[in-house]
Image: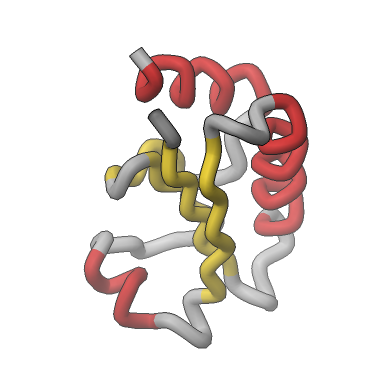
């Protein structure tokens, strides 16, 4: 099974690079388990509206927003492992 990870960001967000970095670190550890998509809400507002996002960064796993704000690596790993079960 592959977990789809969507990271919602905005160019003006000071915390978004941290969220992207954490997702990229986890992706390196689990390359066969993740499908990562980075979404700039300024370019793809429809997706943000579809998920009901009011703030970035946000991370969705398999179509469900699991984090608003940048998760730490352990939180993200734990959530992904739940999805893989």
Q: In this view, does 46 lie to the left or right of 25?
A: left
Quarter of image, res 28: top right
Up-down: is 46 above or below 76?
below
Residue found 72% across the figure and 44% down from its top: 24
Residue 26 at x, y percent in the picture: 68, 31
Q: How is the image coloured?
A: secondary structure
Q: In this view, does 66 lie to the left or right of 49?
A: right
Quarter of image, res 33: top right
Residue found 56% across the figure and 51% down from its top: 36
Residue 5 at x, y percent in the picture: 48, 46
Up-down: is 16 above or below 40?
above
Q: Nearer the viewer, residue 1 or 47?
A: 1
Q: How many labels does the image show?
A: 0
Residue 71 at x, y percent in the picture: 59, 34
Q: Nearer the viewer, residue 4 or 58?
A: 4
Q: Report the quarter where the C terminus lies.
A: top left
Q: In this view, does 45 lie to the left or right of 59?
A: left
Specify the farthest residue to the bottom.
43
Residue found 40% across the figure and 46% down from its top: 60
Q: Nearer the viewer, residue 75 or 31?
A: 31
Residue 53 at x, y percent in the picture: 33, 62
Quarter of image, res 44: bottom left
Q: Report the quarter where the N terminus lies.
A: top left
Residue found 52% across the figure and 47% down from its top: 35
Up-down: is 56 above or below 75?
below
């Amino acid at each position: 099974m592959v977990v789809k990870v969507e990271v919602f960001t905005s160019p003006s967000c000071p915390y978004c690079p941290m969220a992207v970095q954490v997702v990229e670190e986890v992706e390196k550890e689990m390359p066969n388990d993740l499908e990562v998509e980075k979404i700039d809400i300024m370019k793809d507002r429809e997706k943000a509206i579809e998920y009901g996002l009011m703030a970035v960064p946000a991370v969705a796993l398999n179509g469900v927003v699991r984090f608003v704000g940048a998760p730490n690596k352990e939180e993200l790993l734990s959530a992904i492992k739940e999805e893989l079960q």
